[in-house]
Amino acid sequence: EMHSKIKDSLEALAQIRDITFEINEPGFDVLVSKEPERLMNIVKSKCWLEKTIDTYRDYISPPKARISDVEDRIKQTQTASAPSNVTSVTMNHSTVTISIGDLTTQNVDAIVACSTSEYLCKAITDKAGAQVQKEYGLLKLSGAFPGTTSGGTLPCKRILFIPWSPDSRDENSIKSSLNTFIELAFAQANVDGCKSIAFPAVGCGKFNFDPLLIAKYMLDETRKQIKIQKSKMNILFILLADQQIVYDAFVKHLNQMVTIDLTVNQKIPTKQKDDHQTIGYDKKIIKIILISTNENHLMKCKQEIITLAQTYSIKSKLTNKQDMLDWSQETIYKYYEFCLKQRVIPTLDLANVTLELVGTKDAVHEAEKYFYELTSQTLKEERIQAVSRGVVWSVESIPNSDTWEQYSFKLNGIIEDAHLKKHPNVCSFNEIGTNLSS
């Protein structure tokens, strides 16, 4: 009988299945924290549920305002000579930096070249000069990779030629090959006594791998090697100027590492793109693990949880909001900051004059109200400017009656603006939808 019970228990354990998924619907973390019973009611008697809420720093880029003022032009002049995109963090007393630039111009102890990339190796050795070309030729002839050459005419002291080529496009193969690539580079750097090393982002060129995967596995293995080495190092990942998407992927994962690992601290969180700043905010990711002996229960509970998350947040779209074209850059930033504090994700589309808001119902409602408040404030400022110029435009209500009706402040501003720009006519609509052309 005991043998039978043990056998039954082992068979039950063998049938246990689990499923893991993530939900990033805005505001769902509030429901999970304040109303956990809603989740438990879904899985009750079907699955065991485990949940965690992770927070990481994400960035959103507001659109560029259609109008500019003197202050904007001054800021553009001041930032014209600003450095390229750079983001750094500290890991166990070492520094990891993501930067857009040229690998061959880095003033470090060693730069890393993927020895299986003929194009990259030729580009680097051509710049490094005849001596390095000769050293590299001997390495290639003997197949002695990983191998090291001098830096030649480059600012670096050494060039580490490390092989990398995944066996397939399978994610496990990519991870394994990148782990080996980073590990070999660190091992060679340690042998050569290097304290600073610069990597390219392999796999994001002709291989066309997902930059998020490349960033994740290269940075994760770098963190692991830093902990193993235990000596202070300066590690750089240098991305090409046309690899903004790759840069964003590396920065995104670096920010996630800052959140989940207490040994990783933000040091230089700067990100500049076309003189146009981004706004950072805390993004919540809910990780759900479901465990059950019944596959159907797992899939059903997963779908019901996803549906619950989707119904908890709403998407609102305001269209034909021409007034947003009068917003200054300062106003746009102000609105985005307000929305993000409300945990609402805004998308202001100036080309199509639309505003999309995603978040909980109450938060989206507050964001809509604030949009109209800022619009009203902008129109008020336009009115003050018009009055200060002493210009009030009116229309004769009945021809030859000498009875004049003053245009609204908004239309007054539109007509005055057209007049100052010497436009021959202006077309707009009044408050009741009548076409006004002059």
Image (cartoon, rainbow, N blue to C red):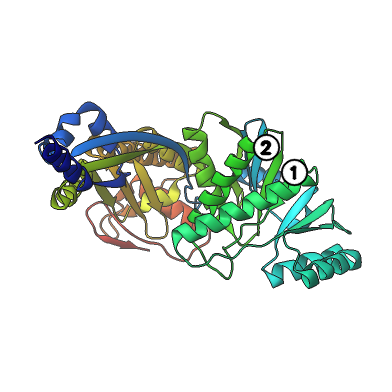
State the residue position of label 2.
Answer: 229
Residues 363 and 247: in front is 247
Q: Amino acid at mark 1?
A: Asn
Task: Give the label on residue 265, or none.
Answer: none
Tell me the crowding category of disc 1: few under 14, some 14 to 19, or many 20 or more residues within 10 angstroms, Cα based: few
Which image quadrant for residue 346?
A: top left
Q: Residue at x 49, y 67 (%)?
A: 168
User: Residues under labels 2 and 1: Cα distance?
Assistant: 8 Å
Task: Give the label on residue 190, or none.
Answer: 1
Residues 322 and 284: in front is 284
In terms of sequence position, does the residue under pointer 2 or pointer 1 come before the other? 1
- Quadrant including the C terminus: bottom left
Residues 418 and 124: in front is 124
x and y percent of residue 66 in the render?
A: 49, 53
Question: In this picture, is 181 found above or below 278?
Answer: below
Residues 120 and 192: in front is 192
Residue 387 shows in this picture: no
Q: Residue at x 69, y 51 (%)?
A: 185
Q: Amino acid at mark 2?
A: Gln
Q: Residue at x 37, y 42 (%)?
A: 375
x and y percent of residue 171 in the render?
A: 45, 59
Tell me the crowding category of disc 2: few under 14, some 14 to 19, or many 20 or more residues within 10 angstroms, Cα based: few
Q: Is 178 situated left or right of 21 in this image? A: right
Q: Are marks 2 and 1 in contact (CB under 8 Å)?
A: yes
